[in-house]
Amino acid sequence: MAATRRTPNGAVSPNAAGIDLCLHLIRRDHGVEVANRVARRSVVAPWREGGQSQFIERPVPEPGRAGTAPARSWALEHLGEPLSPQDLAGHARMSVLTFTRRFREETGLSPSRWLARQRVELARRLLETTELPVERIATSAGFGTAVSLRQHLHAAIGVAPLAYRRTFRGAPPAGGDLRAG
């Protein structure tokens, strides 16, 4: 692992090697999910093959009692279903225009962009923590097809699903379909 972390002059960085070792020990002792959380908090990839993007966690705003928070919470429970701004506004008992304005004030995003981001986050969690095929993850996260998931994931973080899974799992899933990533 340490050989992939080099300084501009080609030498292995002792600090980076130490980070790699710590993440390896955490992964071995506490599992992939804990190591991934530590890596995100440290703003490093949990498993590097070189030239990786940083994978930073973006938490969802805490649901509250007023505004659009109940609709956001409901949407998070229904990400695998087709959801539109009209569905969310209806759930919040607001007009689409009022809901969209309040939603944007509370989250900084349009309902559609927020929904796409949450679906990407769900797909990332499933890629990290399960052996589900990419097609099934795409359906569970509300993307419908592996092609749609691949496009959204690449737009969000610049990698394909199986490359993302390898980054966080260290190896491709046994018997995985390489065409889906």
Image (spheres, rainbow, N blue to C red):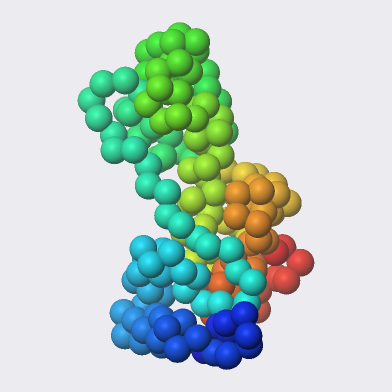
Residue 80, percent across and down? 52, 43
Quarter assignment of residue 32 = bottom left
Residue 101, percent across and down? 45, 16
Would residue 8 be seen by someone viewing this image from the given angle?
A: yes
Q: Nearer the viewer, residue 169 or 26?
A: 26
Residue 17, percent across and down? 46, 87
Residue situated furthest right in the rendering: 179
Residue 160, placed above or below residue 108: below
Quarter assignment of residue 6 = bottom right
Position of residue 90 in the picture relative to residue 152 (left or right): left
Q: Nearer the viewer, residue 114 or 141?
A: 114
Circle count: 0
Residue 65, placed above or below residue 40: above
Q: Quadrant of the C terminus?
A: bottom right
Look at 47% across and 74% down and name the residue there. 46
Residue situated furthest front in the rendering: 9
Residue 168, percent across and down? 51, 71
Look at 40% across and 86% down and name the residue there. 18
Look at 35% across and 69% down and name the residue there. 38
Residue 81, placed above or below residue 148: above
Position of residue 164 in the picture relative to residue 90 (left or right): right
